[in-house]
Amino acid sequence: MSTSIPCTILRGGTSKGVYLREADLPTDPKERQATILAIFGSPDKRQIDGLGGADPLTSKVCIVGPPPLVGTGKYADLSYTFGQVEIDKPSVDLRSLCGNLTSGVGAFAIWDGLVRPVPPMTLVRVYNTNLDSILIVEVPVSDGRPLESGDFVIPGVPGSGAKIQVDFANTAGTSAGALLPTGNTCDRLDIPGFGKIDVSMVDIGNAHAFVRAADLGRSGTETASVIDADAELCCILEQIRAHAGVAMGMIDDPDRAAEISPATPFVAMIAPPQDYENVIGGNHVAAEESQFLSRLMFMQQMHKTYAGTSTVCTGVASRIPGTIVHEARRSSDRDHMLVRIGHPAGVIETESALDLDGGAHVVTRATLGRTARRIMEGTVYIP
């Protein structure tokens, strides 16, 4: 006999997720994971018996609950836990954060009556349990409801929508202990089967490891199909990710990185601005449209667009002299707060601002502009 749970399916940015209320899930961690896996139809590479879309970008869960207790020092309107649901393994990774779906959390809170709408812009303070941080989500509203129509366009998403702004400035260092986890803007790691390579490790939104595409014999303009078909390169990138995770204190054993922490740290290949073809949108992206290029690995595959937290982290990294990202950024505008990143489906923008405090970089603004749309509200049945 089936049991049922209320759920909402929302597209947030370039991801799609199942949004659940914490109170509707089992309190026991093992039972909760089993319930979420059943909702998505995992483990199964097609997720045919659940709501998952057989793609890492659509196999995501957002669990929304009450705000932290008074006295914890975490004033917020609600709490939010993100889970990356494995497709062909019985696991839900709670170690990372999805920036795209965070935009949907603000809209969900208003739709679900958890936050009172204040026109024209409602600021939703979200306590994220994954990173133990407060996120600020700015949701445009009208007539007591989140606005969904607008003229803001996101590469990788058809049409346009109302712009939702998410500020991740408070998440610096929450995954690996510091904005620059090793204390350096660039380290040289020794990768088994490859050799030594320069890596910049930066932690905001999620921890990331940045490498030069050229150091791997690539231009930085490659498509997801090209990268995913290159088994040797994918293996090297996973090795870099694993050893960067060890260097940042996030992973104990690099040989078990995919098992222990399959999502974070992320690894990205960085290159100077160049012309390339957007195979998703079917258009040409000129070099002058971006300040540098990035190709991101996510869950052992190349991201078809660009992750929200990666946008924030990459933008901040481009403002820190000495990093591989700063090196690749067009020198004429390295001091500008607005950062434009060329990714496989076009160009994504972020605002990045930092101050110096005793020689240390302090992030004061790290934003992501997204759109979100409610797709379905209803009941999911669990066998």
Image (cartoon, rainbow, N blue to C red):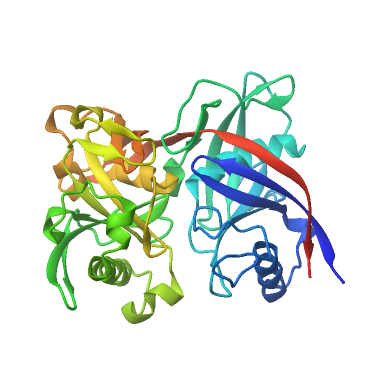
Judge by depth and name the residue closer to the eye, 192 or 188: 192
Q: Is residue 284 left or right of residue 8?
A: left
Q: In this view, which residue lies farthest toward the right? A: 1
What residue lies at 16% left-to-right and 55% top-to-bottom?
218
What residue lies at 17% left-to-right and 56% top-to-bottom?
186
Displayed quadrant of residue 154: top left
Relative image position of residue 223 (x, y in whole percent)? 29, 50
Q: Is residue 73 visible?
A: no
Q: Is residue 86 visible?
A: yes
| Quarter of the image where the C terminus is located | bottom right
Displayed quadrant of residue 275: top left
| Quarter of the image where the N terminus is located | bottom right
Q: Is residue 49 left or right of residue 380?
A: left
Displayed quadrant of residue 129: bottom right
Examine the rendered structure and indicate whether residue 233 appears above or below residue 170.
below
Judge by depth and name the residue closer to the eye, 115 or 295: 295
Relative image position of residue 102 (x, y in whole percent)? 55, 44
Relative image position of residue 265 (x, y in whole percent)? 37, 62
Q: Is residue 207 left or right of residue 260?
A: left
Examine the rendered structure and indicate whether residue 376 appears above or below residue 207.
above
Examine the rendered structure and indicate whether residue 363 appears above or below residue 226.
above
Counting the numbered discs, the total is: 0
Q: Is residue 322 left or right of residue 277?
A: left
